[in-house]
Amino acid sequence: MSFREDFLWGGATAANQCEGSIFEDGRGLANVDVVPIGKDRLQIILGKKKHLGFDDDLYFYPAKTGIDFYHRYKEDIQLFAEMGFKTFRLSIAWSRIFPKGDEALPNEKGLAFYESVFLECKKYGIEPLVTITHFDCPIHLIEEYGGWRNRELIGFYETLVQTLAKRYKGLVKYWLTFNEINMILHAPFMGAGIVFERGENEEEVKYQAAHHELVASSVATKILHEVDPENKVGCMMAAGDYYPYACKPEDVFEAMKENRHNLSLIDIQARGVYPNYLLKSFEQKGLNIQITEEDKELLKSHTVDFISLSYYASRVAQANASEMTAGNVFESVKNPYLEASEWGWQIDPLGFRITLNTLYDRYQLPLFVVENGLGAVDQPDEAGFVKDDYRIDYMAKHISAMRDAFELDGVDILGYTSWGCIDLVSAGTGEMKKRYGFIYVDRDNEGNGTLKRSRKKSFYWYKKVIESNGEIL
Ligand code: BGP
């Protein structure tokens, strides 16, 4: 037996990257809807350029139609079932449930949509794995309250979680509170609906918003455990260890600092207290973060049950940074020993094993790998078939490294959901061209295409991986 018998194999998506239908059934708008593809995307994601509506003459907004999962979810879930998925990770679009975010009563049509998605999963014995927020924040909460910089969002999120916990009791057991919570420090508009005001202390705003999300995450954990003791609640981080560029102590120290920066919020969600190194850095930078005694109590009393993570690449730290390379949202120093994807993300399966060990050593909590995969350009042949051997190669090596972490190192891993199991819109670039799926979707960067789904070579490969519980790669 290579993985645990009940290992949860599956795939992952996010509402804003696949659903589309953003104006349907009473849904409200969110930050993720108004992020266009193209040159201004990054500045908007970073919170440097204010853009809270649509300018259709100037921009194209891929989230408007996504891959039309909203109407095609039955077909898509059937394909997942055909691959043998045990779990399917998806996220709730907050603004489908509370269109503005601050209402007292939810939108029934939004609740009914996810209910039927979950029932469809259950039909095939697929366990839903639900991200409560995957980068989305209702636009109204940004316009009226300034997004997560405002403490009041904790209460609105609490109402959302109360609603979801009660409505989906018995249907959903695995919950993630915030997707890649550490992204708030790198992409604050995307992570927390933050648009910076001129002259303000951006670090302080980011950490204050992060604190609000951390408290909200503890409140969610509390509610979900109270409503159903069977519920398992996890935090979620963009993981990938930093290596020192060289063995010189300055590089090693730099790597330690970068790793802490990446892990700091997870330290709090897993251990329930702010780590000293973070509190000291607030002091040194003169950041005044409002943390109440009640917050501390909540953080302490409601830590997570498991740690979930995305892993795409390892990273490199150097005291005097030299050549840089792209990565998941932010850059890192280029590692001369590694190859990279077409988007410059460095490929490092052993780094995956190392990262899993780091997290397990540090927290001693089960891990759940909820994102991993290769973003690549796929070229269907004349018959429309995609022979994605490069994707199979990437995934086989990563799953093998994960198996080593489990089998040889004793890391407890609950499951693995590959990112973008069906092609969807890229979060970083907004492209369709950057594909991760086992299922090809006929759609291009400009929104042209029939949206037809077809099985790639990796579809049949992953089916075997699941059938053999990771023995045959
Ligand atoms: C993570 C996000 C996902 C996803 C993935 C791949 O940061 O949680 O939403 O998109 O990265 O990134 P990209 O889409 O930029 O290739």
Image (tube, rainbow, N blue to C red):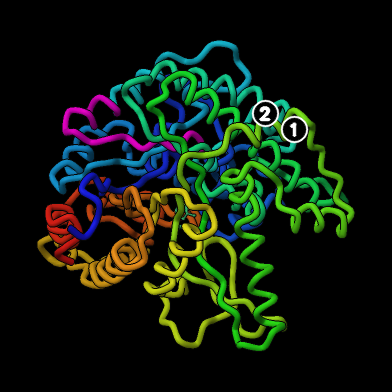
Instruction: Mark 2: give few (<14), some (14-19) or many (20+) Cα within 10 Å.
Output: many
Does dot 1 land on a helix, a strand or a loop? Answer: loop
Q: Seen in the image, is 102 located left or right of residue 387?
A: right
Query: Does the CB distance between marks 1 and 2 fall below 8 Å?
Result: yes
Q: Is residue 94 left or right of residue 373?
A: right
Q: Position of residue 381 (x, y in %)?
A: 15, 67
Magenta region includes residue 126: yes
Where, quadrant-wise, is the C terminus in this rendering?
bottom left
**Does 213 sit above or below residue 285?**
above
Vertical position of residue 259 compared to residue 253: above or below = above
- Asked if residue 190 lies left or right of residue 462, the reply is right
Q: Residue at x 57, y 76 (%)?
A: 316
Please tell me which residue lies in front, 322 or 300. 300
According to the image, label 1 marks what residue?
A: 150
Mark identifier at residue 153:
2
Question: Does the Cβ of the disc 1 residue fall within 8 Å of ligand 1?
Answer: no
- Range drawn in magenta: 118-133
Amino acid type of the residue that numbered disc 1 sits on in the rendered structure: Asn
371 in relation to 89, above or below: below
Who is closer to the viewer here, 217 or 421? 217
Image quadrant holding the N terminus, namely bottom left
**Residue at the image position 14 percent from the left and 54 percent from the top:** 463
**Residue 377 in view:** no
- Counting from the top left corner in percent of width and height, residue 51 is at 66, 43
Residue at the spot 42% in from the left edge and 38% down from the top edge: 15
Relative to 6, 34 lies left or right: right
